[in-house]
Amino acid sequence: MKKIFIAFGVIAFIAMVVGISSLFLADESLTHDGHIPDTIGAYYLTNKIEGEEAKQIMNQLHGDEVDLDEAYVLEYQTQRGSYAIVWISETNLVELPPKLFEDMLEFVENSELYINHHEKEISNRNVQYAFGTERDNYYFATENRFVWVATFEDKRDIFIKNAVKIF
């Protein structure tokens, strides 16, 4: 009987370790395939704006009307209050994401709002980084998206690593 309790204890411990680890380890299979993840690591989706409202927000942020197929503004937060925002502009126009990226690169490099601007490799992708408006900002373009991620807290490394994979 004592051996059974020990065996159950070991199994429970292993299950707990696997469960906790899954919150902090990167998931290699994460992708943004038309759905928005409810969680990214320990961050939970707390607000999502999409459709026409998000497109209007993106047009304001880009400073111009942009031909977008879809747009998202996503807010994530941990139970301890760490916070991140993701802005995504999606289009089928192959020339648009690189243009949005170049426009933003020029804006950030010439703005007094941002400091410490440089390129970083995150999750095998080159990402631009700048500190400004009291947050860490990361941005990049893919074949059909321009993505900007802003993080505010110490746990940002795990979030940004996974967000770059997903989006």
Image (spheres, helix red, strand yellow):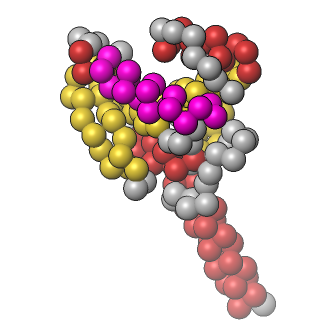
Identify the residue shown where x is 61% and y is 60%: 29
One can see residue 38 in this view: no
- The spot of residue 23 in percent (x, y) is 58, 54
- The spot of residue 157 in percent (x, y) is 40, 45
Classified by dominant secondary structure, the portion drawn in magenta counts as helix
Is 103 inside the magenta-drawn segment?
yes
As drawn, 68 above or below 157 = above
Q: Quadrant of the C terminus?
A: top right
Q: Which of the 4 image quarters holds residue 54?
A: top right
- The spot of residue 87 in percent (x, y) is 55, 26
As drawn, 72 above or below 113 = below
Relative to 122, is 28 on the left or the right?
right
What's drawn in magenta, residue-wise?
A: 90-107
Identify the residue shown where x is 66% and y is 70%: 15
Identify the residue shown where x is 40% and y is 56%: 124
Most extreme residue toward the right, as rendered? 1
In the image, 68 versus 161, the foreground residue is: 68
Relative to 53, is 124 on the left or the right?
left
In the image, 130 versus 152, the foreground residue is: 130
Number of on-image labels: 0
Identify the residue shown where x is 32% and y is 17%: 107
- The spot of residue 31 in percent (x, y) is 62, 51
Q: Quadrant of the N terminus?
A: bottom right
Q: Which of the 4 image quarters holds residue 30?
A: bottom right
As drawn, 104 above or below 79 = above
As drawn, 30 above or below 164 = below
Is 59 inside the magenta-drawn segment?
no
In the image, 158 versus 74, the foreground residue is: 74
Relative to 110, is 60 on the left or the right?
right
Relative to 159, is 6 on the left or the right?
right
One can see residue 7 in this view: yes
